[in-house]
Image: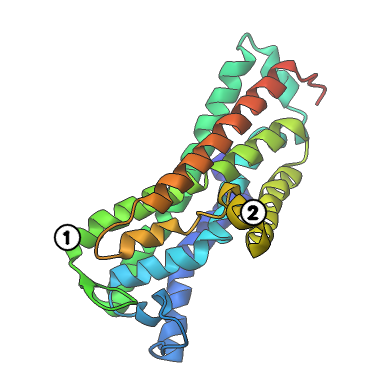
Amino acid sequence: MRQFRRRRTLVAFGILLVLPWVLVVAFKVGGDPGTDGVPGLVDVATSSALNFALFALFVSTGFLLVVAVALFCGDTVASEAGWSSLRYLLAAPVPRGRLLRQKLIVALSYAVVAVVSLPLMSLLAGTVAFGWGDVELPTGGTVPVSTALDRMAIIVGYALVSQLVVAALAFLLSVTTDSPLGAVGGAVGLVIVSNILDAVTALGSWRDFLPTHWMYAWMDALQPEIAWTGMAKGAAVSIAYAVVLFALAFRRFRSRDIVS
């Protein structure tokens, strides 16, 4: 409840919930999107509510959702240190591991709600603005609503898994520094640097190990037949990084001298 009442939490959820309506207004003002080069989700964004939700998720995955996840996971411990209340929490007869576990559960819960709330609000806004119907694929063809809803669940699930590495790094930085903005900024900086390195084609297959290389692998779920290879690799990379970073966070917190 303390986390929910914070202004930055309310602002983050406000942006996520308002963005779909801003996109609706943009499409209504600008008209139907036209084809510009390689077909993409923007070309079919106004075809149906599901198409619109997929487009909203596409434009938000690389930055907006990253910031939201980093905010909730990077603020949880560092904010207590910033308020000089962390040492009083540790004065209670509660093991450090248990305290950190509960904070991680709360942080990940807010991160999940943040990632899920965007496509849900996009479905609502898309239904009001563009109606309900089958998903039109950018490359041609359609996916029936019944199948598309299952695909949408897979896509959102993969989006959650791909954000695990951001959550883990933000959480590790949160137990290392007393500055919440430093923890959030460090996690967002990781994504920026990873995206820059991913653009360096000279790295070849080394890019497969970058935490953001597979961030958009959920696009494979929009094919007539789902291609699981990219999502499997992306999930493996993200989970592996997350396990290591979470373990380092718990180890660091158990041995840290808390003076704030």
- Mark 2 or mark 1, which is nearer the start of the sequence? 1
Front in this rendered view, residue 188 or 122: 188
Disc 1 crowd rating (10 Å Cα; few below 14, some 14-19, many 20+) is few
What residue do we see at 24% from left, 54% from top? 150
Instruction: Give residue 15's position: percent from left, percent from top.
Output: 53, 62
Q: Residue furthest top?
A: 93
- Do we see residue 1 in this rendering? no
Disc 2 crowd rating (10 Å Cα; few below 14, some 14-19, many 20+) is many
In which quarter of the view is residue 3 placed?
Answer: top right
Residue indicated by mark 2: 191
Instruction: Give residue 124's position: percent from left, percent from top.
Output: 32, 66
Q: Which mark is residue 146?
A: 1
In which quarter of the view is residue 257 placed?
Answer: top right
Disc tally is 2
Tell me if 223 is positioned left or right of 184 in this view.
left
Look at the image and tell me in which quarter the C terminus lies: top right
Vertical relation: 224 (above or below) 67: below
- Do we see residue 129 in this rendering? yes
Q: Amino acid at mark 2?
A: Val
Disc 1, SS: helix
Instruction: Give residue 122's position: percent from left, percent from top.
Output: 38, 66
Disc 2, SS: helix
Tell me if 131 is positioned left or right of 30 in this view.
left
In which quarter of the view is residue 152 placed?
Answer: bottom left
Q: Amino acid at mark 1?
A: Ser
User: Decide: marks 1, 2 in contact (CB < 8 A)?
Assistant: no
What residue do we see at 44% from left, 63% from top? 57
Tell me if 219 is positioned left or right of 62 in this view.
left
